[in-house]
Image (spheres, helix red, strand yellow):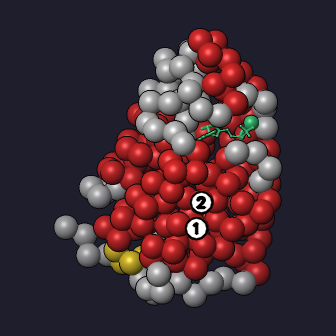
Amino acid sequence: MSTETYGAAFAVRWMDGVAAAVEREAGRLTDLDAAIGDADHGANLKRGFAAVAEALAKEPPATPGAVLVTAGGLLIATVGGASGPLYGTLLRRAGKALGEAGEVSRAELADALAAGVAAVGRLGGAVPGDKTMLDALTPAVEALRESFAAARSAAEAGALATVPLRARKGRASYLGERSVGHRDPGATSSVLLFAALEEAAAG
Ligand code: ADP
Ligand code: MG
């Protein structure tokens, strides 16, 4: 069992890693969104996480919880699309759940992110199987209880499993049957979130 703990610098590394990944993968996220949405998912996340990375570099918060609350608030404020308030809620709620602790365990992080995922479900009204980011986020936070690597691969499997689904929430749901056969953009960006988390945890 791991007794490792994770502090504010880790959380900043995580958010910087997400910013770098969405910058790198923006074209692919936008192509996925072009197929079943409005072709802005890459640009949305790039703008949001660039603002997060900039703010954290300027004034790094003292605790991992405060890092996530700051990041979430900025995503809500800077991203126009549905994904901004959804990812923003995930991180803000998780940050609040971590409270004032200077260092947290992986188990505490998993609990906090589970609270965040539940808040995303309440905000968007989606459940796993609706072909949204929840299809990757839900199994990922569950697997995070096991390891960072397990969380990343659960997110990957969840995102891949959105391909045959028919979208029941968000813009893609307007397409009905025509959403089948395409990978959900938000579930795909959720993989980047958990890949960056694994990298940040590795140091
Ligand atoms: P928009 O749909 O407003 O253009 P984005 O393109 O940035 O926003 O994000 C689209 C992604 O957001 C979708 O691929 C899906 O994963 C996620 N999404 C949309 N609506 C919901 C919802 N109600 N619940 C959970 N996730 C959602
Ligand atoms: Mg879109």
Between 196 and 137, the residue placed more toward the observer is 137
Q: Reply above or below: 49 against 82.
A: below
Residue drawn at x 48%, y 86% as measured from the top left = 100
Q: Reply above or below: 62 against 184.
A: below
Q: Amino acid at mark 1?
A: Arg
* Place of residue 19 in the rendered image (x, y in percent of width and height, measured from the top left): 68, 57
Q: Reply above or below: 77 against 178.
A: below
Residue drawn at x 37%, y 44% as measured from the top left = 139
Q: From the image, tell me which residue sits under label 2.
A: 89
Q: From the image, tell me which residue sits under label 1.
A: 92
Residue drawn at x 50%, y 30% as measured from the top left = 130
Determine whether the residue tagged by mark 2 lies in a helix, strand or loop.
Answer: helix
* Place of residue 115 in the rendered image (x, y in percent of width and height, measured from the top left): 43, 61
Q: Give the image quadrant in which the ligand numbered 2 is located.
A: top right
Residue drawn at x 25%, y 70% as measured from the top left = 2
> Mark 1 touching mark 2, by CB under 8 A?
yes
Q: Amino acid at mark 2?
A: Thr
* Place of residue 92 in the rendered image (x, y in percent of width and height, measured from the top left): 58, 67
